[in-house]
């Protein structure tokens, strides 16, 4: 485990979850899969699988968003715990903008249009304070185009 990084534990993740739901207008509260949450929070600490900060942040956000471990607010809590990870590891500026920059992206992650690899390339550019290269912009467009928005269209 990377000794210098700070990781959120299960109990603190539940506090973040409750506060996120309350602050964002409510919703059905509850945990559907405690083991899944614990797995994500544990695996993110494995430097063999996730050796870089970007890989860890990507795994944390992707895993919590797509795992549907909570009754409601999986996208919101994935972003909020991503912000927690950024703040507690000294990435204050990135944390400040993370929710706004990733809000539209996380929707498409949850819908299965943006996979973990594409999310990691997006987060890599974000963390490097770089604009997306044209090839990445096109890949994002192709991932989300003509797929609908998931509401009785």
Image: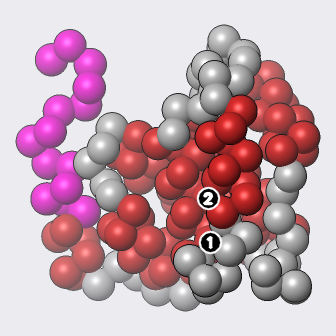
Nearest the viewer among 115 and 33 is 33
Looking at the image, residue 136 lies above or below residue 146: below
Residue 32 falls in image quadrant: top right
Label 1 environment density (alpha carbons within 10 Å; few <14, some 14–19, many ≥20): many
With 16 as the anchor, is 70 left or right in this view? left
Residue 52 shows up from this direction: no
Q: Which residue lies at the image location 14% right of the left edge and 39% below the top edge?
A: 147
Residue 28 in the magenta stretch? The answer is no
Q: Residue 60 carries which label?
A: 2
Q: Is residue 152 magenta?
A: yes
Residue beneath label 1, please?
A: 56
Question: Which of the 4 image quarters holds residue 152?
Answer: top left
Residue visible at 44% across and 72% down in the picture: 120
Secondary structure under tag 1 reads: helix
Q: What's the residue at 41%, 40% (across, down)?
A: 110
> How many numbered marks have been drawn onto this rendered protein structure?
2
Kindly indicate whether the residue at mark 1 contacts the one at mark 2 (C-beta within 8 angstroms). Answer: yes
Residue density around tag 2, few if under 14, some if 14–19, many if 20 or more, within 10 Å: many
Secondary element under disc 2, as helix, strand or loop, is: helix
Residue span colored magenta: 140-153
* 56, above or below 12, in the image: below
Q: Quadrant of the C terminus?
A: top left
Q: Nearer the viewer, residue 13 or 91?
A: 13
Per the model, the C-alpha gap separating discs 2 and 1 is: 6 Å
Instruction: Using the image, determine if residue 107 lies above or below residue 4.
Output: above
């Amino acid at each position: 485990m990377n000794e210098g990084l700070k990781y959120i534990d299960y109990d603190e993740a539940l506090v973040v979850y409750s506060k996120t739901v309350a602050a964002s207008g409510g919703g059905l509260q509850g945990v559907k899969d405690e083991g899944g949450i614990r797995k994500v929070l544990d695996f993110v600490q494995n430097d063999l699988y996730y050796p870089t900060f970007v890989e860890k942040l990507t795994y944390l956000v992707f895993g919590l968003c797509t795992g549907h471990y909570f009754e409601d607010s999986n996208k919101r809590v994935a972003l909020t715990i991503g912000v927690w990870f950024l703040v507690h590891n000294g990435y204050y500026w990135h944390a400040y903008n993370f929710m706004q920059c990733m809000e539209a992206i996380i929707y498409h992650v949850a819908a299965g249009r943006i996979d973990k690899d594409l999310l990691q390339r997006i987060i890599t550019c974000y963390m490097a304070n770089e604009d997306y290269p044209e090839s990445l912009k096109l890949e994002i467009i192709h991932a989300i185009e003509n797929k609908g928005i998931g509401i009785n269209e």
